[in-house]
Amino acid sequence: MDRLPHTGVSTASPSDLSPSRAPLTTVAVVGLGTMGTGIAEILARAGREVIGVDPNESACRRAVTALEVATARAVHRERISERERAGILDRFRVSTDLRAAADAELVIEVVPEDYDTKHEVFAALDTVVSPSAIIATGTNALSVTRLAAESAHPERVLGLHFFNPAPAMKLVEIVSSVLTAPAAIEAVTALARDLGKEPVALGDRPGFVADGLLFGYLNQAAAMYEAKYAAREDIDAAMRLGCGLPMGPLALLDLIGIDTARTVLEAMYSASGDRLHAPAPILGQLSEAGLTGRKAGRGFYTYEAPGSATVVPDAATAEVRHSTEGARPVRAVGVAGSGTMASGIAEVFAKAGLEVVLAGRTLEKAERAKARIGKSLERSVSKGRMTSRAREQALERITAADALDAFAEVDLAVEAVAEDLVVKQELFKVLDKVCKPGAVLATTTSSLPVVACARATSRPQDVVGLHFFNPAPAMKLVEVVRTVLTADDVRATAHAVCAAVGKHPVDCGDRAGFIVNALLFPYLNNAVKMVQEHYATPDAIDAAMKLGGGYPMGPFELLDVVGLDVSLAIERVLHREFREPGLAPAPLLEHLVAAGCLGRKTGRGFREYAKA
């Protein structure tokens, strides 16, 4: 941002930040980029007088045009009247001179994430606005406390972090330093609610809640791609389909700006010292090369033009994606297990027209699993997703059995038993003996080494991981896990089977967590650490991630659904494999599990639940 003019106004007067102060009716927004323009629109629509300030005349013109376009669209959609639109436009004026903000009761600074630039704006504002005016910084990476301490009236300085796009996103993080007056927080909180936003009050630390959790996850995804563990498209598809996220992490980094992400992570690492926050080298390489994402036309992906959202093929786009060339024919499938996952997988195969042998430890268990499938299919019939005849045909394709000997003629054997390596290895020894030569042997493990199952057989080249997600009939994702011993045609067979049953396969190597769990559970663990450190409550964190990140569930909702014991086990596996101190399970998680508070299944986890 260009240098802002100072005036000779004295700052000797004390701030008037009494609780009885009048509502904030005149607001200045300093910095009219995308975020600043969006905030100005929200304020003007809510009846505030808005002064937009930017030293760049083009930015001022673009802000006015953006508001004209947005309000015209709202009129067209009959959300506001022409009269209301005229009022909104009348309430917004722009200037290249910071002195235009003199009468503002609140100033929101939204200039680039650079301390010197922000400090210059704050120093200039101290000479421009009334001592009773509140000054808010839109930073998500820099210290609010430092900016406050170096201002003339630190008690009136706070953080006000909107999310992009500001008009659409409900969350606003309101950040106080140890110097901030409570009355300032109260006034801005009331304003946020009046704007239709959900304010969350927080202390000062880089990233706050939403970005503090989000950017660590994004950083690990970038490192995963840099290590060539999985293709960028597979990483993004895995997190969208496996976790229900609106965007994959690498596409989101391109949208945010890779340079911006690097700045936020640098600030987080400086504060935490956690190596998981140290920016992945690829972020620095892309930033230095000017490949900062959508705004540059190229980042992790290549775009049609700078600013475009349309991805175009580039050198990293595989010519042949998930080839099924050379795949072995699969007409009959054996599923070992009688639990929820086993019955779900058997249902998926039967509905796709494959013959299925479902083997439990006893015939009674296998029959109960088949009955569970029948009820699931009946629900599909009642919802109009399949016909009664199709349900009958699918059930007819499933044969219940009490021994793995029934797998003698299957082309694919899928193990879906307890997540215990010894149990799985013993099962694979039996599959090795009873399955015909050329049959593919698959494990559905989500955390154990696939190669350890493979080595329990005399044909490790025929073993692959097929990690379905729960509930298997509904979830589209399957992680295809290839060990160093898996044959090419076995991998191709896994992809062909996924295509045949309507699933989306993603390729990854045989290491703890694969793609989804390796990115998801450190994020959940970091959320627990935030609560453990008394930085925020589970409710505030869940709200932040749903409203600010577009997550379908908050981390504590998800932990209670998954089970705290299951989550702890996966955290331990990740920590043991990667040896990163930051992956060590949060002590609070361990204490809750030790106390038997395992989530919904026990009636208490991070929250209490009514017993069924």
Image (cartoon, helix red, strand yellow):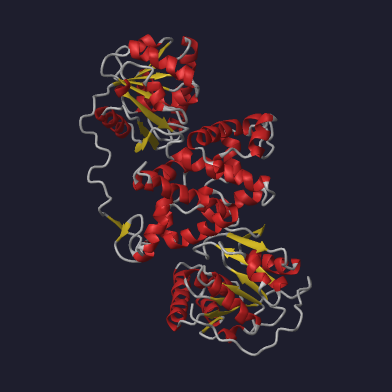
Whether residue 346 is visible = no
Q: Which residue lies furthest to the left in this view?
A: 326
Q: Where is residue 244 in the image (x, y as percent from the top left)?
A: 47, 44
Q: Is residue 78 found left or right of 565 in the rendered image?
A: left
Q: Return the residue nearer the eye: 152 or 437.
A: 152
Number of residue marks: 0
Looking at the image, is 423 positioned above or below residue 583?
Answer: above
Q: Position of residue 542 (x, y in %)?
A: 60, 48
Kindly identify the residue that appears in the image at 56 percent across and 73 percent down: 118
Q: Where is residue 97 in the image (x, y as percent from the top left)?
A: 54, 86
Looking at the image, is 277 positioned above or below residue 573?
Answer: below
Q: Which residue lies furthest to the bottom in this view?
A: 8
Q: Is residue 54 found left or right of 585 in the rendered image?
A: left
Q: Where is residue 599 in the image (x, y as percent from the top left)?
A: 63, 34
Looking at the image, is 147 positioned above or below residue 409?
Answer: below
Looking at the image, is 453 positioned above or below residue 210?
Answer: above
Whether residue 55 is visible = yes
> In which quadrant is the C terminus drawn?
top right
Q: Return the residue nearer the eye: 312 or 349.
A: 312
Kindly identify the residue that appears in the image at 41 percent across and 35 percent down: 384
Q: In which quarter of the image is residue 597?
A: top right
Q: Is residue 66 found left or right of 435 in the rendered image?
A: right
